[in-house]
Amino acid sequence: MKKVLFVLTSHDELGNTGHKTGFWVEEFAAPFYYLKDNGIEITIASPKGGQPPIDPKSSAPESQTPATVRFYADNETQAQLAKTLKLADVNQADYDAVFYPGGHGPLWDLAEDKNSIALIEAFYAHGKPVGAVCHAPAIFKHTKKADGTPLVKGQKVTGFTNTEEEAVQLTNVVPFLVEDMLKANGGIYSKKADWNPYAVENELIITGQNPASSELVAELLLKKLK
């Protein structure tokens, strides 16, 4: 059985707004069930371990999908989520791929987390796929190849667009814009119209543009694993 590590944010403060953030339920649930239903064993980790924060907006009625409805009725997966491993205790050797769901949280912690950066670099160096969707491509801010160049340099990538960030009115709240960062790191960035499903793969890196793209990333990841 192939094993995939899911890494979720532990960060719950939306800048200085006084509002909460975390991970986006749909971006966790859709890939989780897609991979699980296809016989993949999933382990979940986060920087602090334990229960990762859920972005409250992702629990709103208008954000629900069949995958989130399934998640909220699934006590077993909720129990697994409440006991995430600490990122520092995770070893890439135990997994075949790693996947990062988004939400705004990763912009603050996972983008800067030394354990996460080292983990991604280790997966990449060992020829294992790295998937990320929406805001989660923020994880490539500091990741490097063995030669010291940015991991995404010269690679086809996507992620939450500047115009999508503008639409949710958080351009001046977030520590950086995913689209700008990927371009600055030399990524060959592309996108579709805002909120449309879009995912790209390049060698070992698989990225999705927004919440609607999360299952597409999982599909590409599964193909790589097979």
Image (cartoon, rainbow, N blue to C red):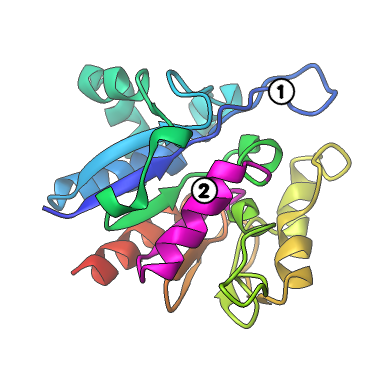
Image coordinates for residue 144, horizontal then vertical, percent: 62, 66
Q: Residue at x 80, y 16 (%)?
A: 18
Describe residue 182's horizontal placement relative to residue 17 as left or right: left
Question: Callout 2, which amino acid?
Answer: Pro
Local crowd size for mark 1, using a 10 Å CA cut-off: few (<14), some (14–19), many (≥20)? some
Residue 131 lies in quadrant: bottom left
Report if residue 51 lies within the magenta region: no
Q: Secondary structure at mark 2?
A: helix
Describe residue 109's horizontal placement relative to residue 198 as left or right: right
Q: Residue at x 60, y 67 (%)?
A: 158
Image coordinates for residue 216, horizontal then vertical, percent: 38, 61
Q: Earlier in the sequence, mark 2 or mark 1?
A: 1
Q: Which residues are magenta?
A: 112-136
State the residue in front, 112 or 179: 112
Residue of label 1: 13
User: Does residue 162 lie above or below 103 as drawn?
Assistant: below
Label 2 to label 1, Cα distance in Å?
A: 20 Å
State the residue in front, 221 or 84: 84
User: Does residue 16 lie above or below 39 as drawn?
Assistant: above
Residue of label 2: 211
User: Does residue 101 lie above or below 202 as drawn?
Assistant: above
